Image (tube, helix red, strand yellow):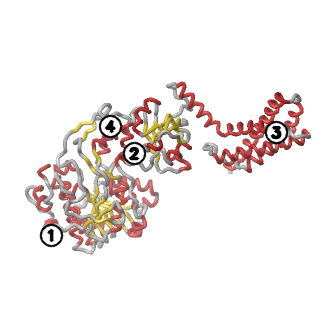
Amino acid sequence: MIKSRFSVFNTLMQALLDSFFCWISWFGAVFVFTYLFVNDFTQYLNAVNRSIWVMILACMVFYTVCGVYKSLWAHPGIGTMLRITMAVFLSSFAVYVSLRLRLGFWPNPGLGMMAFYFLLSFSLVLRIHKRVLGIIFVYMHRFTRTAHVYKYDPIRTLVVGAGDSASGFLLHPSQQGGRPRDIIAVLDNDQNKHGYTLHGKKIMGSDDLIPHLVAKYDISEIVVAVPSIKNKDLRRIVKLAPVNNCKVRLLSGLSQDKASDALREIRISDLMGRPEAAINISGINAWLKGKTVLVTGGGGSVGGELCHQLMSLNVDKIVVFDISENNSHNLKEELKVKFGQAGRYKVAIRIGSVQDEKRLDAVFEEFKPAVVFHAAAYKHVPLMEECPRLAVDNNVLGTYRTALAAINHGVERFVLVSTDKAVRPPNVYGATKRLSEIVTLGLNEKSATEFVCVRFGNVLDSNGSVIPIFKRQIAAGGPVTVMHPEIIRYFMTLSEAVKLVLETGAMAAGGEMFILDMGEQVKIADLAENLIRMAGLIPDVDIKIEYVGLRPGEKLYEELLLDEEGLTATLNDKIFVTRPEMSPKVDNLMEALANGMPWEGDIREMLKEYVPEYNHKSS
């Protein structure tokens, strides 16, 4: 109600101002016209003054009918300009007819045209004065180049891209902190566009000109207006942009009507990841509808994200099973904040170890889950090199005992979350994950429970990953430590990885190994440089990069597939599937696990017996 009254008051005030400007316009037109052509000023002025009520009524009626008072003048376009021009023309014509009745003869048409132009100018200035002031200060800044920043001092912007996104942005450039943007120039790698203009801004050339133009025109911001830009091209632009005095922003998810809303800071996932894959939500929902889902390692990065995404699906209950009480408690609080009452009653937290048979049996008996996502594992490569026995106990024996609990309590499907480090592993961690794959797929033939594995690479910003470590090192002033200048890794966003894990679970039938398409491998050194640049610093100048050598068990590159594992495409182009042949020693392994892995001697030699491709000598 208050808003409605304010709207009526605002419209009334605009109408009164328009009426006042109408009188001023006719008064000014009469003064100029009579001064130039007629000696009798008084006759025309009296007629104008007697028509004041006609002016008020005409402005209120015609401006309302033409929709002037419903236009958002923060973003005027051609349509709004045409509406106000029509309203001014009709109002001026009404006053012109009124003067004919007052004077007894038709005034010179030139008088009406002059009043029309005066009123049109006043009406436009009334509505776009903020933008006019912004433009004035833009040109003042070009001539003065003062270092002092005023309220309207513009952000000097360079736009990369001359397509539809750039067009929308140039029509509606956003403001930041009350400061308008001064679009200096546009760049595009399409040579056919060079030399032309886009909404009055010259397309100067390709993005190779970025360093030159930033220095020449004192550019403070680069807007990349190519939402579909490839990650390698965006990395090159970030590398070309001088740091400290120039910020790079990305225009993504563009809406032509409000282009500036899509302008945001560049994230590390923009540089190192790729567009997230589309998934079959309806298929996942149909699979999980009304079911209880248990997530082991639910307090970790992948397990926690699984719980977040499961909350948006039709599951009946989510059971978080984790050995860390702090991680589990924090996850519960996050879910309550994000999902309200559903986060409170839909999620159950149970603390325990996957090595504890009695605890596993109690939790499975309590909730009787239909689906298990097994994400619990020790995963830090150097630490597992120091304590291989614990790696075997948790990653292999823990997987086996969790899988047996699933069989004993009638679980429909068991999904093991595995890693690319299981392929030709040079370290204990990778060897134990490969063994957990063999155990999981081996049990598929021995029970009604469907056992499947899903294998993928590194997850951006996951707990213990290299990115949080680099960020902490940068915040501390460096140095940033990289193992080797040529070391490369696969990377995927946590959100995409979990979505694909859920879809593999939905499409599985048991006995499959699913491989996620991780895209191109990324140099860790390039990742470190990009993080330093994103912090506004210069690599090896402000922050030193040091190469410290490969850690025990590390290798220069990762693989997702063994030579003998043939891949088959699925309906999702980011998911591939294979049915690997069982190891001839799988029965011996099962027997050893059933006896609690009573191994003696060198653990690494024992691992080599069951994982022949394990090359522990390189560790």
Residue 109: give its label: 3
Q: For label 2, count other residues whose C-alpha is less than 10 Å away and answer few (under 14), some (14-19) or many (20+).
A: few
Above/below status of 501 relative to 447: above
Residue 267: give its label: 2
The amino acid marked with disc number 3 is: Pro
Give whichever of discs 3 and 1 has the lower sequence position: 3
How far apart are the two marked residues, 2 and 4, measured between alpha carbons? 16 Å
How far apart are the two marked residues, 3 and 1, measured between alpha carbons? 104 Å
Give whichever of discs 3 and 4 has the lower sequence position: 3
Q: Residue at x 69, y 47 (%)?
A: 83
Q: Residue furthest bottom?
A: 448
Q: Residue furthest right?
A: 104
Q: For label 3, count other residues whose C-alpha is less than 10 Å away and answer few (under 14), some (14-19) or many (20+).
A: few
Decide: marks 4, 1 in contact (CB < 8 A)? no
How far apart are the two marked residues, 2 and 3, measured between alpha carbons? 62 Å
The amino acid marked with disc number 4 is: Ile
Q: In the structure shown, which secondary structural element does the residue marked by tag 3 occupy? A: helix
Coordinates of residue 80 in the picture (x, y in percent): 66, 46
